[in-house]
Amino acid sequence: MKKREAIVSFVEYQNMDELPCAEKALVREALKAASGAYAPYSHFMVGAAILLDDGTVVRGANVENAAFPSGSCAEKTALSYMVANYGDRQAVAIAIAALKDGQLTPDPVPPCGNCRQMLTEEEQRTGRPIKVILAGDSAIYVLESSQALMPLSFTGRNLR
Ligand code: THU
């Protein structure tokens, strides 16, 4: 018998001023994306901005539906668009931010389980870690890889 641990380490910044320039720019893109959300049911507007290895930024927002499960998260929207349109490129980083009543949420918004699964798949597909920047008004978390969000995740390897 062996006890094993999966430890998540990440950097916490107190505010946007502390954040390195490249990360700050991507958070601004995520906020821009959030303003395009279609969220008439939750009024929770989430934006995701993915930075590609050639400098392109792909944005996505949550798109809700009266049939609730038909809606899509911001991260899923952005990742799907990225893979469909820039499949030969690699994602380097993703910033996620949400607006509630038009204001950036105080706490960083962590991606849901489905979106973590999608991020993990994208890392597996390209073999490159994706930096995850979760931005809130009172804290910003930066993780070096989305794998950290999903220890013991199910991947294509499990199907072989
Ligand atoms: N949402 C996202 O866009 N991303 C997440 O990771 C968490 C939740 C959206 C889905 C729904 O439109 C709204 O936030 C409330 O759950």
Image (cartoon, helix red, strand yellow):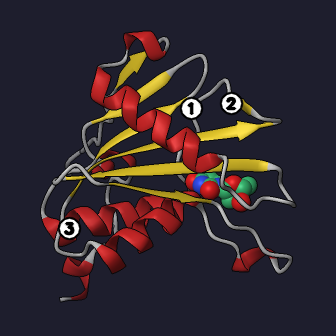
Q: Earlier in the sequence, mark 3 or mark 1?
A: 1
The residue most toward the left is 127
How many marks do you count on the picture?
3
Q: Which mark is residue 108?
A: 1
Alpha carbon of mark 3 to alpha carbon of mark 1: how far?
A: 25 Å
Q: Quadrant of residue 148?
A: top left
Q: Secondary structure at mark 3?
A: helix
Q: Earlier in the sequence, mark 3 or mark 2?
A: 2
Q: Quadrant of residue 39?
A: bottom right
Q: Dot 3, how many residues are within 10 Å of its Cα: few (below 14), some (14-19), or many (20+)?
A: some
Left of 77 or right of it: where is 34? right
Q: Amino acid at mark 1?
A: Pro
Compared with 95, 10 (above or below) is: above
Ligand 1 image position (quadrant): bottom right
Q: Dot 1, how many residues are within 10 Å of its Cα: few (below 14), some (14-19), or many (20+)?
A: some
The residue most toward the bottom is 160
Q: Secondary structure at mark 2?
A: loop
Q: Amino acid at mark 2?
A: Thr
The reply to whether discs 2 and 1 touch (Cβ–Cβ < 8 Å) is yes
Q: Quadrant of residue 120?
A: bottom left
The reply to whether discs 3 and 2 touch (Cβ–Cβ < 8 Å) is no
Q: Residue 138 at x, y = what percent?
A: 59, 16
* Disc 2: which residue: 105
In the foreground, 37 or 155: 37
Queried on whether the Cβ of the residue with tag 2 lies below 8 angstroms from ligand 1, the answer reads no
Q: Residue at x 71, y 80 (%)?
A: 70
Compared with 141, 99 (above or below) is: below
* Disc 3: which residue: 124
